[in-house]
Image (cartoon, rainbow, N blue to C red):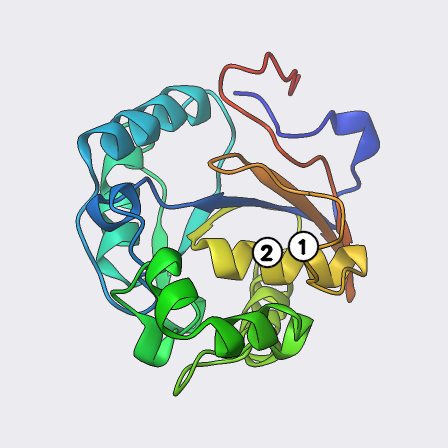
């Protein structure tokens, strides 16, 4: 079995957190905002997850921590076919950002129906908050304690965290010092694996944007 990072770069106290978004869903295909709503994985989404399963089956994964929303549960179910001995812990705190009244709509609809409100929110950075939804700051405030708890409970392990785009971005943008503004240079690619390295109370960025087909060497 291989590790996500070369052993010589790690100490026994370091925990590796691999962040992965769920597979593409039917709503994703239609460009509908999901938030706390749910839809099943699309055919292409299932194929993506199977590709991840093949890649991850040769990696040492001590456990999976995952959102309890249906699309993540479906993703984890597929991954477990390749890593069926890995225990899973479901966390409601890892659910996607609530998009309130905007769930079920497309950004194109919002640009037509609520252009000023949408533009104001896009410029709000970390304070971005859809009507009756949740801000990015609030997302980070509920996710960080989960990460801290996981690191404290399972030091030195390699842990796969399966969640949502809003969760992944909030964690990584926080560690990267990003303001969540549209003029910032793009940091993350979609449907890729991102690593965090934790040691005691310190959490830092590891390699980002890893693909099963990228040839990334973990040995």
Residue on which the image places disc 1:
172
Q: Secondary structure at mark 2?
A: helix
* Residue 30 image point, x, y percent: 25, 46
Please tell me how crowded label 1 is: few (under 14), some (14-19), or many (20+) other residues with Cα within 10 Å.
many
Q: How many marks?
A: 2
Q: Are marks 2 and 1 in contact (CB under 8 Å)?
A: yes
Kind of element beneath mark 1: helix
Q: Which residue is depicted at the point 78% across and 67% down? A: 201
- Residue nearest the observer in this picture, 9 or 53: 53
User: Circle 2 is placed at which residue position?
Assistant: 169
Give the CA distance from mark 2 to mark 1. Answer: 5 Å
Rendered position, 186 above or below 209: below
Task: Tell me which residue sits at (24%, 50%) in the image.
Answer: 27
Horizontally, residue 61 falls left or right of residue 127, namely left
Residue 81 visible in rendering: no
**Residue at (25% x, 28% y) in the render:** 44
Left or right: where 162 falls relative to 25: right
Q: Residues within 10 Å of mark 2 (few under 14, many from 20)?
A: some
In the image, residue 94 lies at what x, y percent? Answer: 44, 66
| Vertical position of residue 16 compared to residue 203: above or below | above
Badge number at residue 5: none
Image quarter for residue 55?
A: top left
Q: Position of residue 169 (x, y in %)?
A: 59, 56
The answer to whether residue 46 is above or below residue 22 is: above
Residue drawn at x 48%, y 42% as measured from the top left: 62
Position in image of residue 36 (x %, y %): 30, 70
């Amino acid at each position: 079995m291989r590790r996500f990072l070369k052993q010589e770069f790690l100490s026994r106290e370091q925990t590796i957190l691999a962040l992965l978004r769920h597979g593409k869903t039917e709503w994703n295909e239609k460009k509908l905002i999901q938030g706390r709503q749910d839809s099943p994985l699309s055919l292409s989404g299932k194929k993506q997850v199977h590709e991840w399963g093949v890649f991850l089956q040769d990696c040492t994964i001590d456990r999976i921590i995952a959102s309890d929303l249906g699309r993540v549960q479906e993703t984890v179910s597929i991954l477990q076919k390749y890593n069926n001995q890995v225990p899973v812990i479901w966390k409601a705190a890892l659910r996607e950002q609530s998009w309130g009244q905007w769930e079920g709509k497309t950004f194109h609809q919002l640009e037509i129906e609520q252009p000023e409100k949408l533009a104001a929110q896009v410029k709000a950075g970390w304070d971005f908050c859809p009507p009756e939804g949740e801000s990015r700051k609030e997302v980070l405030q509920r996710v960080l304690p989960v990460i801290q708890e996981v690191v404290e409970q399972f030091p030195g392990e390699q842990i796969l965290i399966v969640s949502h785009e809003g969760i992944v971005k909030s964690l990584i943008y926080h560690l990267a010092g990003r303001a969540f503004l549209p003029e910032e240079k793009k940091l993350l690619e979609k449907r890729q694996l991102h690593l965090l390295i934790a040691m005691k109370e310190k959490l830092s960025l590891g390699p980002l944007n890893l693909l099963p087909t990228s040839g990334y060497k973990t040995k």
